[in-house]
């Protein structure tokens, strides 16, 4: 049975914002994994939880979402709490954003209604701007091309569950490494575990130089390639990402790279034995549907791991792990 973290451990995230994977410490990371396992145990054994009874989370999504929004809401309900939600896109605004209200003003108001704020926005830096306007903890659920820390945390949790460890693994990160906030966050967490990284992308979609340089300066082994099959032959984990159509300056640029990589049965046939395949989803066509039946295809299990991870984040930041 998974153990509840100690009071000393719980203090590590109490009252904190979770804005970037870059600033999470290894101790905080361990605490989140431990708390998620504790909550997963409760979910599997159908224990009803009341850790956040009487508490409200604001779930503010200014960009499309299925998994992130619904798993945050599910997490809050599973903890006995409740949610108020804004779910809109720049094309279909339903909040006072449509009247020209700034995010900063909106957050100052909403902060007075709730106990914790979860925010997704197309604007890089929106998590920080929200945190500046709020007294309660803010969790960044994706800010433009910036960061997506709760995704990276559930990715780490998934690798731990699938492989039993992360230390010593070789992780290949494939696809849109330029605009993808999920890979930007994941690599910052992976650096704590001493694994080797392979970045696989077309030259136009390489990992931003400042991220690669920072990892290398910290002694992480990073290889950059455009050869998917060669990377799959070596990797223990293949992390696939979608080409982020909505971030491209022009349709033509997107069209020129959109089908750069597709993980097919042929790729799986040359993959390292026991390789797991992860994807933050949604999938467009980066992974052939026939690959879903491969035992290492972990992406739907991965999506389900979002609930215990987000339960942990909500309860830890607000000091409600009971
Ligand atoms: C990711 C995102 O929004 O950055 N999706 C998610 O949260 N699971 C990845 C993506 O949209 O490609």
Image: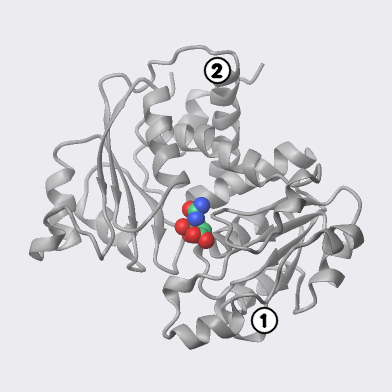
Rendered position, 157 above or below 53: below
CA distance separating discs 1 and 2: 43 Å
Would you name the residue on which mark 2 appears?
A: 42
Mark number for residue 202? 1
Rendered position, 7 above or below 84: above
The answer to whether residue 177 is seen in the rendering is yes
Q: Residue visible at 46% across and 32% down?
A: 311
Q: Secondary structure at mark 2?
A: helix
The answer to whether residue 21 is seen in the rendering is no
Find out whether the residues at labels 1 and 2 contact each other: C-beta distance under 8 Å: no
Q: Name which quarter of the figure residue 182 lies in.
A: bottom right
Give the number of the mark in front: 1 or 2.
1
In x, y percent, where is residue 197? 74, 65
Mark 1 surroundings: few (<14), some (14-19) or many (≥20) residues within 10 A: some
In x, y percent, where is residue 239? 68, 58
Q: Residue visible at 64% across and 47% down?
A: 156
Cβ of disc 2 within 8 Å of ligand 1?
A: no
Mark 2 surroundings: few (<14), some (14-19) or many (≥20) residues within 10 A: some
Residue 71 shown left or right of residue 233 in the figure: left
Q: Residue visible at 37% across and 25% down?
A: 77
Between 302 and 102, the residue placed more toward the observer is 302
Residue 53 shown left or right of residue 155 in the figure: left
Q: Secondary structure at mark 1?
A: loop
Cβ of disc 1 within 8 Å of ligand 1?
A: no
Q: Residue visible at 91% across and 51% down?
A: 273
Mark 1 vs mark 2: which is more N-terminal? 2
Residue 264 shown left or right of residue 3 in the figure: right
């Amino acid at each position: 049975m998974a153990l509840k973290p100690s009071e000393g451990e719980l203090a590590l995230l109490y009252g904190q914002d979770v804005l970037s994977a870059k600033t999470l410490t290894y101790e905080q990371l361990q605490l989140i994994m431990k708390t998620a396992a504790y909550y997963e145990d409760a979910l599997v054994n159908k224990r009803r939880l009341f850790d956040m009874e009487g508490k409200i989370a604001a779930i503010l999504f200014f960009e499309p979402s299925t998994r992130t929004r619904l798993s945050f809401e599910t997490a809050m309900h599973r903890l006995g709490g409740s949610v108020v939600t804004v779910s809109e896109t720049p094309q279909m605004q339903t909040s006072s954003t449509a009247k020209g209200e700034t995010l900063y003003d909106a957050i100052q108001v909403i902060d007075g209604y709730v106990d914790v704020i979860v925010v997704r926005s197309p604007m890089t830096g929106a998590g920080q701007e929200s945190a500046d306007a709020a007294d309660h903890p803010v969790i960044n659920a994706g800010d433009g091309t910036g960061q997506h820390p709760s995704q990276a945390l559930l990715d780490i949790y998934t690798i731990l569950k699938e492989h039993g460890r992360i230390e010593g693994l070789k992780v290949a990160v494939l696809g849109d490494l330029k605009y993808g906030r999920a890979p930007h966050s994941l690599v910052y967490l992976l650096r704590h575990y001493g694994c080797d990284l392979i970045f696989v992308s077309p030259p136009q979609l390489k990992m931003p130089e400042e991220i690669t340089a920072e990892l290398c300066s910290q002694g992480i082994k990073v290889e950059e390639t455009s050869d998917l099959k060669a990377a799959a032959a070596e990797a223990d984990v293949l992390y696939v990402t979608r080409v982020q159509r909505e971030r491209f300056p022009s349709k033509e640029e997107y069209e020129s790279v959109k089908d750069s990589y597709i993980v097919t049965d042929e790729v799986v046939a040359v993959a390292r034995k026991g390789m797991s395949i992860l994807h933050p989803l949604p999938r467009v066509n980066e992974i052939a549907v026939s690959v879903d039946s491969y035992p290492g295809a972990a992406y739907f299990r991965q999506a389900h791991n979002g609930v215990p991870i987000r339960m942990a984040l909500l309860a830890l930041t607000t000091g409600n792990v009971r």
